[in-house]
Image (spheres, rainbow, N blue to C red):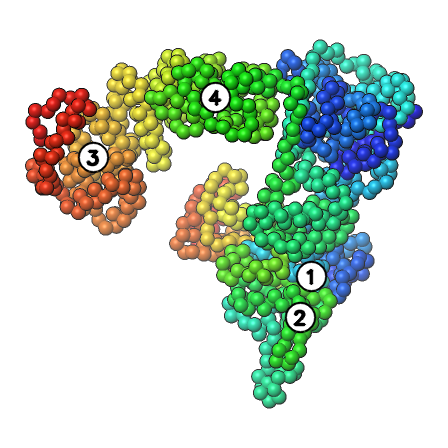
Amino acid sequence: MSVQILGVRHHGAGSAQYVAEVLKKLKPDLVLVEGPPEMEAMARWIGDKALKPPVAVLCYDQERTDQAAFYPFAAYSPEWVAIQYANAKKIPFRMMDLPLSIHWQMERDETFQTETEIKEHKSPLTYFAEAAGYEDADLWWEDHFENRYLPKEADAHFEAVMLTMQTLRDAGLPSHLEVENVYREAYMAQCIRQAQREMYQNIVVVCGAWHGPALLNLEVNESQHLEILQKLPKSKIKVDASWVPWTNERLTWWSGYGAGIASPGWYAHLWEHPKDTTGVQWLSGVARLFRSKKVDVSTAHVIETTRLAESLAALRGRPRAGLWEFNEATVAVMCMGEAIQMELLKRELIVGKDIGKVPKDLPKLPLHADFEHNIEKLRLPQPDGKKNLELDLRKELDLKRSIFFFQLQVLEVQWALQTGVRSRGTFKEGWELKWKPEIVIQIVDKGIWGNTIEEAASKYLISKADQSNAITDLAEYIRQAIPAELFVAIDHLLLKINELSAVVADIQQLMAAIGPLSHVSRYGNVRGTDLQTIAKVVESMLIRVCVGLPTACYGMDEQSAQSMFKLIRSVHDAVRIIENPELVGQWQQVLQTLATKAGIPAIIRGCTSRLLFDAQVVSQEETTTQFGLALSNGNQAMESAAWLEGFLSGSGTILLFDPHLWNLLYRWMAELEDDMFKHMLPILRRTFAQFPTAERKQIGEKARQGTQNTGNKSAERNDYQDFDEVQGASVLPTLALIFGLKQPESHV
Amino acid sequence: MKTVLRQHAEQQFAEELEELRKQDNGHRPPNWLLSPRSVVQYLTGTKLKNGYEISPKYIGNNRLMEIAVATLTTDRALLLYGLPGTAKSWVAEHLAAAIAGDSTLMIQGTAGTGEDAIRYGWNYARLLAEGPSEQALVESPMIKAMRLGKIARIEELTRIGADVQDTLITILSEKTLPIPELSSEVQATEGFNLIATANNRDKGVNELSSALKRRFNTVILPVPASLKEEVDIVHRRVDSLKKAYKLPAEAPALQEIQRLVQIFRELRSGVTADGKTKIKSPSGSLSTAEAISVLGNGLALAAHFGDGRLNADDLASSLIGAVVKDPVQDQVVWNEYLETVIKTREDWRDIYRACKEQ
């Protein structure tokens, strides 16, 4: 009765090679693999052609979707290799780690001592690495145990691994999960004993190298282990598991199997080409990649890179060049020392872009199942390839589809993208459906938020809102939630926004939020949503703005005034949209205060004067007076220019049609001293450059003519001397018909 | 006997090289005085088995030195690239000293460097009297290095005109230098290689042709990564400077160096050390080498005109000189920095006052 313990590194390509070799030699009748037993049913699929790594097993609590854990596998994961062997040879295998149900129960029971965070935890392997002159424990491990696969040396390899770990454990160095490991290792040992009792003769155990020594001496430790295991809680948690596709990029993250790996692409290369000891194959791949991006890399470059990597490895006393050497040699030879191109290399080769596949007929994560159910229910095209849809929101089915798409957008699932701009009056919406394999992963990612798309979207949005204290964020979330019809979330968001707007000190934030919200309250109606509440919130926010604005603008510096000036314009637009006469009145009063009060930055005074003038609240004479005041000699020239910027921003048409203003501006400009003019040129240019080209041209032509006679209009008439009145009049009846006017009795 | 102002690296560090040679049992490439690993140790500093301390010549990422040395063991030449003052020439000199025991085979690249400087020239008197002959040939350091199997150096490669640069191609690829006038050639012997340095900032001057680029492995020497590293570099260099010039001044306090390096780093990166305030950067490169010379200057002032102790006043004048390269724009940058950053720091009052008085 033999038990062979193979200590591995999860996702270690060298470990995997040795595991494969041992299995082939020992021909075990049972394989035990580290991993929770809940994933056993899923693991039976390993080896099936439809299951293509990188993939992960997702284990989750049936009742609480937020409790979940991923167990990723690559083709070179030793666990994957072991189970694949067992499945191919039709021998039994077992997952022998502590069940997740118990693990999660422990986390929920407060009586259990949970892991205390060890600050600046040092991996025990670091001690070996440092002694051997390595900067990094991982690098040391890779050099000694992963990067060189020596066939027929498997026994020596695992013996060395065991000895290494035994030494570290004997020295009493803690691993990073010290508390948890006590239970897990007792449980694993017990699993092995159980297998022995079942009279398996030839057992191979694949587990993390660190655990190896704890699984020796099974007889001696039995009573101690049983004692530990008795402390474990009973658990009623029901765990479900499912395969999900994974990506190389995700293999670099931390997950259920502990550390991620930094370079999955490089590992895959080691696994697929164990004989590429010189790295020529790797570097040829690098060269091909560079060439595909139009970087000239010749064969000679590859040769030189190989040689430099070799010399580097020799200089460092390493048995053979590893990824570090290849990268450094690549930078020095192929990239002219610039590390920037390595980013490309890292993305494409070192990490790699592989995406896994899972069989279609597997049980799916509830959220994913709901996604597919929705596709069927809404008679949407199967997720595959690219397709454009045009929806008519008056039809019930199309409306539901649109809602579904918007919910996906809330969940950041990028399948359906809206195309074109939804114009206000129409009921059409254009969508582009573009399927990418990552989308499944995006859905799986959100699985913790709920079992249906709607529920998950709602909860996800609420949780995002709870983390944010910025009104602008919340306004944006509301804008997303309305077309997705997430009513629960909308209520929550409105409540929160109301609370926040009461306490928020920064009036600019409030103002920034009003714009998008007012839009929603005005135009969102197309979809038949009840938007009364939003309107109320917007109104209360507006009132707050009206109260606080004059004080906020008082004594503002130039930079803040610039942004405030834009905000005032956007709030002004919002007020016009809302069309509540009471609010409009209040707002205009505030504007008037701003336009005349001293201490308010000139740009804001200018802007408010213009808004009031456009709204015809202030008469032309009054505006002319203000214009004159602002441009009079007593003012600082810079201030006048700022006022002008505020007043003219957006449109200069007013200058073309109001000779009074024109003359004031013209004279002011003419009287400027040379130096002053140069000083003010940038700010004037900024103002005028925003006007449409045609307008600028007209203003320029007008400027050539100098001041204008404000009394009679004959001068203007002269411009239109060759106007043919008879021909002009002939279009008037048709125009009148179009505008629904009476036939004009006489023409101009 | 008069002592020279600045010794060559192989003279100044003769003892260290000798100690390294004694304990070095690694494989030596042909004509190398040390094994590659010992060369790296010479550059990065270490403590030998017999307790002898090798001082670090390059403080920074050791991996870069490994790449540089590994390159020289292959038949590719080495190009050290970087901003002004990142120790390119310094590293090149020490590499040549450690590998070949001779750092003098150097060609200074300038806009006026002609082919003669790289290949060979003629002793015209002899040439006219005897016609072309071996004796009439004036050999360049390059030819000497090729004959002796040593390391040749070219400083500021990108300042040399493109047509002249390209004469290097034959030397680097064929390892020969033809002398058509004598129908002969010089063939490089084992151990020959070339280290060139070039400046990042004026890359545009004469960019290397891609044929030439292909014959170099490039190592970019970065500006020091951390304040600590940079302070360490300045500290060491100022110490040796003080010894070389026999300045009767106290070595500057570490704190003074730290302050200066911090000013340099902040102005260089455009953000204060705490990462909270943005500031403008002046037009100069503000390299570590300049920080060293500012301190050297300050020490000289302190020694000859002050009380022998480096204080803020001694630093201020050369500090401003290093920062303000453009009298208009840099002055604005500096004043802004002075008023918004230096002034606000409690324990920097002395330096603020000193700078204001300048």
Quick check: marks 2 and 1 in contact, CB under 8 Å?
Answer: no
Q: Are marks 1 and 3 on the same chain?
A: no
How many angstroms separate mark 4 from mark 1 (CA)?
62 Å
Q: Name the residue tied to disc 4.
A: A406
Q: Kindly indicate the quadrant of the structure image that contains residue B169.
A: bottom right
- N-terminal of the pair, mark 4 or mark 3, is 4
The foreground one among A473 and A133 is A473
Q: Amino acid at mark 1?
A: Asp
Q: Name the residue tied to disc 1.
A: B75
Q: Secondary structure at mark 3?
A: helix
Residue at horizontal 53 percent and vertical 42 percent from the top: B273
Q: Position of residue A706 (x, y in %)?
A: 15, 45
Mark 3 Cα-neighbour bin, 10 Å: few <14, some 14–19, many ≥20: some
Which label was assigned to residue A654? 3
Q: Amino acid at mark 2?
A: Thr
How many angstroms separate mark 1 from mark 3 (CA)?
75 Å
Q: Secondary structure at mark 2?
A: strand
Residue at horizontal 56 percent and vertical 66 percent from the top: B165
Q: Kindly indicate the quadrant of the structure image that contains residue A494.
A: top left
Do we see residue B85 in this rendering? yes
Q: Amino acid at mark 3?
A: Ile
Q: Name the residue tied to disc 2.
A: B176
Q: Amino acid at mark 4?
A: Phe
The foreground one among A18 and A731 is A731
How many angstroms separate mark 2 from mark 4 (CA)?
71 Å
